[in-house]
Amino acid sequence: MGLNLALDELRATGWSDLDSAGCAYDTDGRAYPTVARVRQEFAAAGFELEIRRIDQYSCYRASWRDNAGADSGAVVGYNEAEAAVYALAQLRRTLAAV
């Protein structure tokens, strides 16, 4: 997928880098939230984010649970940052649909 596509997905949800605290920058100079900031945004929404490397497939899996411990979603990415950004995009889409 790539970080650029994950960032495009996040921006499509209305996310803005106006508050660039906790952001890193891609090769095009676009800000994106770091893994630490993504974790903070999940926690603020009432979810716990877990990101782990899947060695068998050389990828990272980001999954999240609600406060009751129920699985709420999962995505994969090439690296930890990509998985985190794409997970935040999916969370924001889900919350907007509720």
Image (cartoon, rainbow, N blue to C red):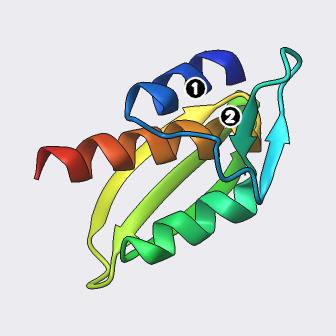
Query: What is the three-letter code of the residue carrying label 1?
Result: Ala
Residue furthest to the left in view is 98
Q: Are marks 1 and 2 in contact (CB under 8 Å)?
A: yes
Residue furthest to the bottom in view is 68
Q: Residue at x 57, y 26 (%)?
A: 6
* Residue 92 or residue 57, whichever sits in front: 92
Q: Quadrant where the N terminus lies?
A: top right
Q: Residue at x 26, y 72 (%)?
A: 70
Q: Is residue 29 left or right of residue 31?
A: right
One can see residue 82 in this view: yes
* Residue 63 or residue 22, whichever sits in front: 22
Q: Is residue 42 left or right of residue 37?
A: left
Q: Is residue 46 left or right of residue 63?
A: left
Pointer 2 residue = 82
Residue 6 is marked as: 1
Mark 2: few, some, or many residues within 10 Å (few <14, many ≥20)? many
